[in-house]
Amino acid sequence: MAKTNLRSVDDYIASQPEATQAVLKRVRGIIRKALPAAEEVISYQIPTYKLRGQAVVYFAGWKQHYSLYPTSAALVKAFKAALAPYELSKGTIRFPLGETVPAKLIERIAKFRAMEVAEGAEAKARAPKKGATPAPSDPSGPVGNQEGPTRL
């Protein structure tokens, strides 16, 4: 069943099976604690946490598991040992619903993603804009006579 009319994370959690709701509430609380300044929204029909307008982390509930998104290669590498018991696929970590919620791990992942997003935004801000003329390296202007040699 498509969840197309969700307006809030409360709506999302309420739309899940009762057994899943407690787990998702716990995940939500962990993320909110880890990212207290984050804006909580629904994006792609799932709970999303944004900082400075940038999506940091998403979560979703499924029949047998709940997932965190997105995962980068750097995140997987940084948490390799801690993530070993969980199923990973491109951009996703799947946690079994029947197991204890790994609160510290989810908190660390949320903080790591916030750092990744902030670093990406800083790098983007430093990058030259497309089509922009780079500033000359010499503040006095271009070297040499731009009009060509002077004839006498």
Image (cartoon, grey):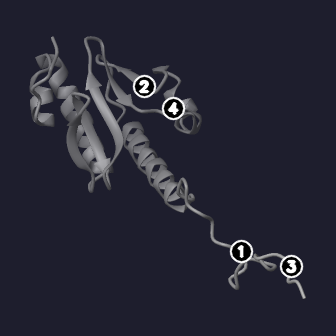
Q: Nearer the viewer, mark 2 or mark 4?
A: 2
Q: Is residue 57 above or below residue 50?
A: above
Q: CA distance from mark 2 to mark 1?
A: 46 Å
**Horizontal relation, residue 94 to residue 53: left or right:** right
Q: Badge 3, how many Cα within 10 Å: few under 14, some, many 20+?
A: few
Q: Position of residue 82 (x, y in %)?
A: 51, 32
Asked if the residue at tag 4 contacts the one at tag 3, i.e. Cβ–Cβ closer than 8 Å, the answer is: no
On residue 149, which mark appears?
3
Of the 4 image quadrants, the one containing the C terminus is: bottom right
**Callout 1: helix, strand or loop?**
loop
How far apart in space, not on screen, are marks 3 and 4 (Cα)? 68 Å
Is the residue 56 above or below the residue 134 in the image? above
For residue 137, which quarter of the picture?
bottom right
Front disc: 2 or 1: 1
* 124, above or below 76, in the image: below
What is the number of the mark on residue 86?
Answer: none
Dot in front, 3 or 4 = 3
> What label sits on residue 137 in the rendered view?
1
Residue assigned mark 4: 82
First in sequence: mark 2 vs mark 4: 4
Q: Which residue is mark 2?
A: 93
Query: What whole-number distance in Å separates the C-alpha atoms at marks 2 and 4?
Result: 11 Å
Whole-Å distance between the Cαs marked 1 and 4? 47 Å
Question: At numbered mark 4, what does the secondary structure look like: helix, strand or loop?
Answer: helix
Q: Nearer the viewer, mark 3 or mark 2?
A: 3
On screen, 72 above or below 97?
Answer: below
